[in-house]
Image (tube, rainbow, N blue to C red):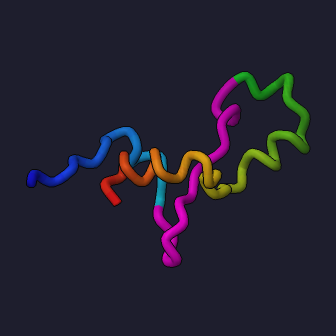
Amino acid sequence: MPKIKTNSGAKKRFKVTGTGKIKRKHAFHSHILTKKTTKQKRNLVHATLVSPADMDRVSLMLGL
């Protein structure tokens, strides 16, 4: 059976942790930042984990 190709967009956006969880960055932190509060921008800086509902789709795109 052929191998599953990794989705090129997904490999740039997600990282797999040592325990197998998938990290992602927050959206809404690239432009139009003047109208957002400092607190909102500060909270968008930190990475978070992919939700369990999306875990299957993201891991398929990454070829895991």
In this view, 16 is above or below 57: below
Q: Which residue ends up furthest to the bottom in the rendered image?
A: 18
Q: Position of residue 58 (x, y in %)?
A: 46, 48
Residue sitting nearer the eye, 53 or 58 = 53
Q: Which residue ends up furthest to the left in the rendered image?
A: 1
Q: Is 46 within the magenta? A: no
Residue at x-position 42% and y-position 54%: 59
Residue at x-position 21% and y-position 50%: 4
Assign the N terminus to one quadrant of the image: bottom left
Query: For this view, does 47 lie left or right of residue 34?
Result: left
Residue sitting nearer the eye, 30 or 61 = 61
Magenta residues, dominant SS class: loop
Q: Give, as a single range, the part of the protein colored magenta.
A: 16-31
Assign the C terminus to one quadrant of the image: bottom left
In this view, 13 is above or below 16: above
Q: Position of residue 50 (x, y in %)?
A: 60, 53
Q: Is 17 within the magenta? A: yes
Query: For this view, does 45 lie left or right of residue 59?
Result: right
Q: Which residue ends up furthest to the front in the rendered image?
A: 1
Q: Position of residue 36 (x, y in %)?
A: 85, 29
Query: For this view, does 47 lie left or right of residue 1?
Result: right
Residue at x-position 47% and y-position 64%: 16
